[in-house]
Amino acid sequence: MGATLIRFLHTADIHLAKPFGWLEDDASALLRAARLDVIRRLGDVARAQSASFVVVAGDTFDVEAPNSKVIRRALDAMAAYPEVIWIILPGNHDSLAAVDLWERCARDTPENVVLALSPEVINLGDDVAILPAPPTVRNPGLDLTAWMTDAPTGARIRIGLAHGGIMDFGSDEGTISVIPPDRAQTAALDYLALGDWHGQKQITARTWYSGSPEPDSFKDHAVAGALMVEIASQGVEPVVTPIPIGQFSWLGHSLDVFSGSDPVQQLLEVLPKAGRDRVLVRLAVTGRLGLLEQSQLRDACERIADDFHHFEVNFDQLGIEQAVDDLDLIATGGALRAAADSLFAQTDLQGRTPEDVQIAQIALTHLFHLAQEEQPT
Ligand SMILES: [Mn+2]
């Protein structure tokens, strides 16, 4: 008892069945499939590195009533690793208020899966005690970890399991943050496994957010993955190692360009060269460019967009560098040039709203683009 090294994986916020409705159907379906695949990847790591159990600190499911096949696939994936025990805590997306969901899970639970549905000690053999704090509703608004302070567990290693914001830090979900940052200390926990933040975050030596194993936003989160936790014996600080699990990466960038810089080169520098089909890109271009440079940058974006799992670029904040030479590239005279001159005049902010200027810029850019396509250069 207590002499064996305890090794387990800490994950959370898998968000199975997350719709990603703003993406094209194929693109969102692949992201959902990747989230289910997370379970297999966790199982593979646990098996390869002899982790005896996996704790999932809430939000296994994105919605309270996922398609029943999603539940079955998830449980089947866990069952495929019979030597690994999976401990599943409800989160805020899949709180105890999702009665049907947890009833269906309970009905089909494989032998190696433990549903942590009440604030009671779960003993894993003689060495480990899990102390879960399942959210009763989406936003309970009170500290559900308080009971851990006087829960007896004998000589077992004490592992707390909770979902929500830490008082000092806030919450990824905008819910009320109530978990005290010193809970591991006050409840004599060897480790407190938290979910809610989708990026990995260490709170104390014994308190961590694992983050989501598969990233899901362009926010500047730390690398997505799981945590391998090793505890030598009671009272000894855990050794926590990030384990990359995710298949997709999400790249949010702003690209500040100016006339005379090489905007296409700048674009290529911020983008990965390999593995693009597993990358989602959201670019915001700022600064000012001449019409020819704008056209070249837009062309470059169009050419590479399909390399990526998803590629979106926003030119709304990109201004036009006023260069009359560029207008010659549209036409040197005639009605077309008159139209170009008129639009060019309307790109001046003087006496105009930013919206009107933007409309004129877009129109001028399109006109330029069309003219370029018509004239062989
Ligand atoms: Mn979550």
Image (cartoon, helix red, strand yellow):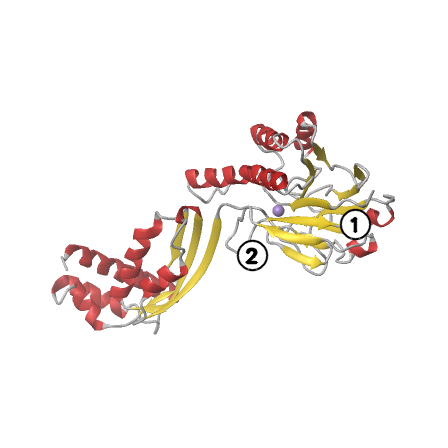
Bin the neighbour count of mark 1 within 10 Å (Cα to Cα): few under 14, some 14-19, many 20 and up.
Answer: some
Q: Quadrant of residue 152?
A: top right
Whether 128 is drawn above or below 101: the answer is below
Q: Provide residue 258's location: percent of width, then percent of height.
A: 34, 71
Residue where numbered disc 2 is placed: 221
Q: Quadrant of the C terminus?
A: bottom left
How far apart marks 2 and 1 lie (CA) works out to 32 Å
Whether 117 is drawn above or below 329: the answer is above
In the orientation shown, which residue stands out farthest toward the front? 3
Type of amino acid at the residue the image marks with label 1: Ser
Q: Provide residue 318's location: percent of width, then percent of height.
A: 36, 65
Q: Is residue 249 left or right of residue 222?
A: left
- Per the image, label 2 sits on a secondary structure element best described as loop
Name the residue rendered at 58%, 46% in the picture.
213
How many marks can you see? Answer: 2
Q: Is residue 281 left or right of residue 208?
A: left
Name the residue rendered at 62%, 38% in the picture.
47
- Foreground label between 2 and 1: 1
Whether residue 17 is visible, yes or no, is: no
